[in-house]
Image (cartoon, helix red, strand yellow):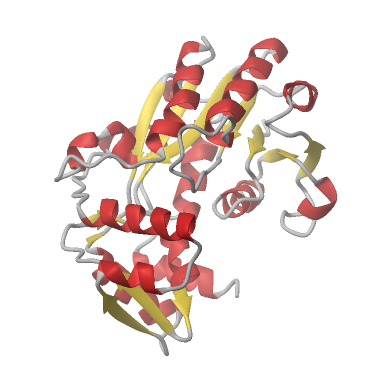
Amino acid sequence: MTKKITIIGATGHLGHRVTAKLVEKGAEVTAIVRNPEAAKSTLPPEVRLVRGDVSDLASVRSALQGTETLYITLNTESLDTTLPFHTEREGVINVVAAAKETGVQHIMQIAGVDTAYPEFSTEGMAYGTNAIRQGGIDAIKASGIPHTFFYCSFFLDSLPKFLMDNQLAVIGNHVHPIWFTNSSDLADLVFNAIDNDAAQNKEFAVQGLQAKTYTEGATEFLKTYAPEAEVIRLPMEAVGQMGLPEEQAAFIEHLLTFVQQLKEELVDSETRAVLGSPKHTISSFAEELRGEI
């Protein structure tokens, strides 16, 4: 029987690759997007596109008609909890309300591994966006709809975004291991969770095969993805010298400061037992991404 899934956030940085991988695996995918015409250039032609905006409850209610399994992959890059609307908070709350009305049977969502394991924070630092995301997570848990959360380590997919002029800057002092994950392995887990009773009302850590410091992981990634490039190390103060808008610079500095004090332990044994083990090394995923350039 064909697995069916509806995705909110399918055109995002991680969402578009997870969506494409689900299609490759034979899933029937519907994407709820604000602009279906624009989404055509991002997503595989097999994806059914439905117009919907998480800020508009009525549009989400309409878009979710016929959905049984829903996957939410949204992100925020703001630290301002006072804003009246965040996609990961009010947006998800709207989605949950619409899902209850339309009979959705299973909701899946991703978040950071630190959300489930705050003890990984060696200095007791909380990632600022978690305070925003928590409202949406709480709404899903309180909905009564069976749910699955994927609490993910650092995505290798993000590294090419930091590559400029054949240099990838590692900012800060990164000494703790990261169990780097990737969108291809995440897509496998999402696919295996569809129509899987053992995955419902569970929280799964999503980690990779190798634990490396951020510097080590970036170096190994570049050897395959961009062998002509080099990793350079810069102090945290460099963020303020990049000429970025103040809010963006503040977010990047907060993110990197949080990452450098995060010390992951391997905690994905249940994930492997229920949904399967990761397949990619850092190098093999870099090779896959390089083939898509």
Residue in the foreground of this view, choosing between 174 and 132: 132
Query: Is 104 on the left-hand or right-hand side of 173?
Result: right
Name the image quarter holding the C terminus.
bottom right
Residue at figure coordinates x 54%, y 34% from the top left: 83
Residue in the foreground of this view, choosing between 155 and 239: 239
Query: Is 120 on the left-hand or right-hand side of 140?
Result: left
Q: Farthest residue in the right direction?
A: 37
Could you tell me residue 200's position as x and y percent?
Answer: 45, 21
Residue at figure coordinates x 49%, y 48% from the top left: 77
Residue at figure coordinates x 17%, y 39% from the top left: 124
Q: Is 216 above or below relative to 279?
A: below
Residue in the foreground of this view, choosing between 178 and 106: 178
Name the image quarter holding the N terminus.
top right
Q: Is residue 293 visible?
A: yes
Query: Is 155 on the left-hand or right-hand side of 56?
Result: left
Q: Is residue 195 visible?
A: no
Could you tell me residue 107's position as x and y percent?
Answer: 55, 24
Query: Is 49 on the left-hand or right-hand side of 142?
Result: right
Could you tell me residue 272's position as x and y percent?
Answer: 33, 39
Could you tell me residue 118's position as x and y percent?
Answer: 23, 35
Q: Count numbered badges in the picture.
A: 0
Residue in the foreground of this view, choosing between 268 and 65: 65
Q: Is 216 above or below relative to 14?
A: below
Q: Farthest residue in the front direction?
A: 246
